[in-house]
Amino acid sequence: MAGNRTFSMIKPDAVAEGNIGAILKMMEEAGFRIVAMKKTQLSKATAGKFYEVHKERPFYNDLTDYMSSGPIVALILEKDNAVADFRKLIGATNPADAEEGTIRKLYAKSIEANAVHGSDADETAQQEGSFFFAETERS
Ligand code: GDP
């Protein structure tokens, strides 16, 4: 079986610091297959749409400013138990709470500029992958 999928972004802080390669290597070494990948920059409006579930949170405006501040890398990743295993690989939202050896522990700068995104459920993974990639890019 091919496994199931999650969606990830390498966020502006990690792209700006030159950490795309190191982070992709950690993903591949943890057994994730890259199904789709693109480097792009979000507008504030597009970042707002992606993070619409957080619209009422106090950090929504800062988050959408940050996520549109520079290029990101969007990815669809495949592995058995992809969503949960990827959340484990990236670590806690706040790098101060992230376990040793996780991507956020190694590369995140702050609770906001935390290097990577990982979907929180299979259904969101599907929605987020479709937000960035056409069907022909993710088959
Ligand atoms: P995730 O699932 O670990 O990415 O965390 P959430 O879904 O709770 O939050 C989405 C993103 O919003 C996080 O990855 C951070 O970039 C940002 N964020 C979360 N909490 C805070 C916060 O308290 N302050 C700020 N400025 N940003 C936050």
Image (tube, rainbow, N blue to C red):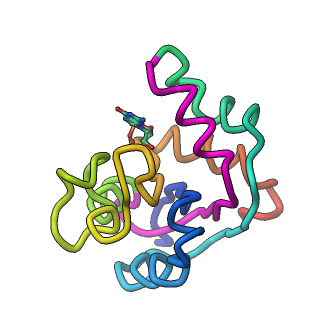
In which quadrant of the rendered image does the C terminus lie? bottom right
At 70% from the left and 46% from the top, the residue drawn is: 130
Question: Residue 40 occupies which quadrant of the picture?
Answer: bottom right
Give the percent coordinates (x, y) of residue 44. Answer: 73, 36
- The image shows residue 33, relative to residue 112, as above or below, that is below
Q: Is residue 79 magenta?
A: yes
| Foreground residue among 111 and 125 | 111
Q: Residue at x 46, y 58 (%)?
A: 116
98 or 79, nearer to the observer: 98
Q: Is residue 100 magenta?
A: no
> From which residue to which does the magenta span run?
57-82
User: Horizontal placement of 49 versus 57: left or right?
Assistant: right
Residue drawn at 50 percent across, 24 percent down? 54
- From this view, report whether residue 103 is shown above or below residue 135: below
- Image label count: 0
State the image coordinates of residue 132 (x, y, percent, origin top left).
73, 51
Residue 75, quarter of picture: bottom right
Residue at figure coordinates x 39%, y 54% from the top left: 83
Vertical position of residue 67 compared to residue 8: above or below: above
Classify residue 115 as left or right of residue 44: left
Residue 36, percent across and down? Answer: 67, 68
Which quarter of the frame holds ligand 1?
Answer: top left
In this rendered view, identify the residue nearer to me: 60 or 77: 60
Residue 65, quarter of picture: top right
Q: Relative to 44, say whether 111 is above or below.
A: below
